[in-house]
Image (spheres, grey):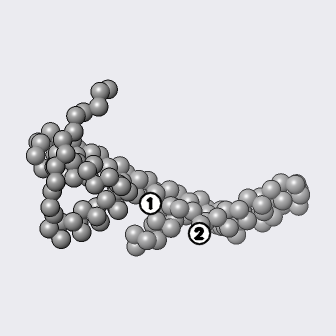
Amino acid sequence: MAKKKTVARSVYLEEDVDKALKNFMASKNINNISLAVNDALKQVLFQKERDERSLQNQILYSLNQHRNKTARDLAANQEILLQFMFEYFANNPASDKRDPEAQKRLDALMETVVRNLGQSKIMQELNEDE
């Protein structure tokens, strides 16, 4: 792809516009002022750029909504599974025929689940939403 020809211009910005531009560049991790200004002008001046940006925002919003719903459903499934396990072990007596190795594996699994439950990224995000 051939590099597009660029034209040099001197532009004077008002203080509030310059501050907004710097904040935008910092939020998007853009180090090149020309690139940031060029993108902003494209979006303002060309309908196609606005439509593409709007479509991208809609897709990102939709994906974010889907991700939040999936996280909520996963957290509910985890809660249901743990509640089932609690009820099962509370209402079913231990068998004398139980394999000691299996008991050790179950104990290790439960320790891991309990230890990692609050640390999961999904659970942290759900707590932030509440």
Residue 57 seen in the current view: no
Disc 1 to disc 2, C-alpha distance: 14 Å
Q: Nearer the viewer, residue 130 or 16?
A: 16
Q: Residue at x 84, y 59 (%)?
A: 104
Q: How many marks?
A: 2
Q: Which mark is residue 72?
A: 1
Q: Position of residue 64 (x, y in %)?
A: 36, 54
Q: Residue at x 27, y 45 (%)?
A: 56
Q: Nearer the viewer, residue 33 or 53?
A: 33
Relative to residue 116, is residue 37 drawn left or right? left
Neighbour class for label 2 at 10 Å: few (<14), some, many (≥20)? Answer: few
Q: Which mark is residue 57?
A: none
Asked if residue 42 is positioned above or below residue 22 in the image, the reply reads: above
Task: Please tell me whether mark 1 or mark 2 is closer to you in this view.
Answer: 2
Q: Residue at x 18, y 66 (%)?
A: 17
Q: Which mark is residue 118?
A: 2
Quarter of the image containing the N terminus? top left
Residue type of the residue flagged with mark 2? Gly
State which tag comes first along the sequence, 1 or 2: 1
Q: Secondary structure at mark 2?
A: loop
Q: Position of residue 80 (x, y in %)?
A: 55, 61
